[in-house]
Image (cartoon, helix red, strand yellow):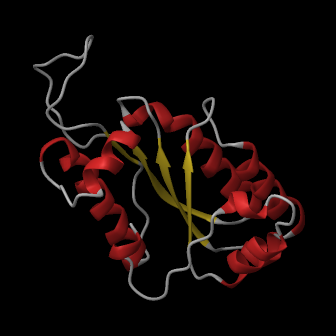
C-alpha cells in the first residue's frame, strides 16, 4: 500500500514499542491519516494492537478525535471476509474514541498474496488483492470513505469451494 500513497508516509512496527507506546501515540497524534495494518489473531487483533487501541481510547481521545482511520488486515484463511469481526472491532473503536472509520481491506490468503505481490504480480491469483489495494489507496488518497473490501485468491479453488462461483472482489 505504501508505494501507492501520496505525500509523506511513516511506517511503524508496533511490536518494537511494547514497553512504551508514547512514541507511537505521538506519531498518531501528528498524522493526518492513520492506517492500521494487522494480521488476524484468534478472530481479532493481536494483544499489542489491543493495548494501543485501549491507550488511545482511554488517554488520548482529544488528540485522535476526527482523525480518519483505515484498516489493512491479512489472514491465512482463503476468504478475506472471515476477518469481518476484526473490522467491526475497529469500527466500534472509532465510534467510541471519536476517530472516523473510513473502511478496511481483508486480504484472504494473505501470506500467499505477499509472496506473489513481492514479485509485482498483479494478475492471476493476486488480481483481486491488487484491485482491492488500489481501491483502498484511491480512498485514502482522496480522503474518502470506502466500504470494507474482502479479497481471495483469484481463479483458484480449494476443497469445498464452488468452482462455478465467480472469483471476484467481494464484500
Indicate left or right for 4 with 86 as reference. Answer: left
The extreme bottom residue here reads 7
Question: Between 138 and 13, which is closer to the camera in this rendering?
Answer: 13
Which residue: 49% across, 48% down? Answer: 73
Give above or below for 80 relative to 140. above
The location of residue 11, given as percent across then percent down, is 56, 72
Percent of width and height locating residue 82 = 46, 30
Q: Nearer the viewer, residue 103 or 78?
A: 78
Q: Nearer the viewer, residue 49 or 116?
A: 116
Q: Is residue 59 left or right of residue 3?
A: right
Find the residue positioned furthest to the right. 59
The residue sitting at 29% across, 54% down in the picture is 132
Relative to 166, 12 lies left or right? right
Q: How many numbered marks have been drawn onto this rendered protein structure?
A: 0
Above-or-below relation of 108 to 49: above
For the C terminus, the quadrant is top left
Quarter of the image where one finds residue 125: top left
In the rendered image, the quadrant that contains the N terminus is: bottom left
Query: 133 or 89, which lies in front?
Result: 133
Residue at point 84%, 73% (across, down): 22
Residue 159 in the image: x percent, y percent?
Answer: 25, 12
Residue 105 point in image, percent of width and height:
42, 51
**Drawn side of residue 16 relative to residue 114, left or right:** right
Q: Residue furthest top?
A: 160
Amino acid at each position: 500500500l505504501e508505494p501507492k500513497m501520496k505525500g509523506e508516509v511513516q511506517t511503524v512496527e508496533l511490536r518494537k514499542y511494547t514497553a512504551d507506546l508514547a512514541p507511537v501515540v505521538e506519531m498518531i497524534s501528528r498524522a493526518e491519516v492513520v492506517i492500521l495494518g494487522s494480521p488476524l489473531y484468534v478472530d481479532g487483533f493481536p494483544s499489542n494492537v489491543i493495548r494501543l487501541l485501549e491507550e488511545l481510547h482511554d488517554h488520548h481521545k482529544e488528540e485522535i478525535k476526527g482523525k480518519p482511520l483505515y484498516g489493512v488486515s491479512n489472514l491465512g484463511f482463503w476468504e478475506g471476509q472471515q476477518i469481518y469481526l476484526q473490522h467491526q472491532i475497529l469500527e466500534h473503536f472509532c465510534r467510541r474514541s471519536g476517530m472516523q472509520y473510513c473502511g478496511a481491506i481483508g486480504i484472504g490468503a494473505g501470506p500467499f498474496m505477499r509472496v506473489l505481490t513481492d514479485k509485482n504480480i498483479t494478475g492471476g491469483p493476486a488480481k483481486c488483492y491488487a484491485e482491492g489495494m488500489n481501491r483502498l489507496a484511491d480512498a485514502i488518497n482522496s480522503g474518502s470513505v470506502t466500504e470494507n473490501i474482502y479479497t481471495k485468491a483469484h481463479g483458484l479453488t480449494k476443497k469445498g469451494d464452488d468452482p462455478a462461483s465467480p472469483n471476484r472482489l467481494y464484500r
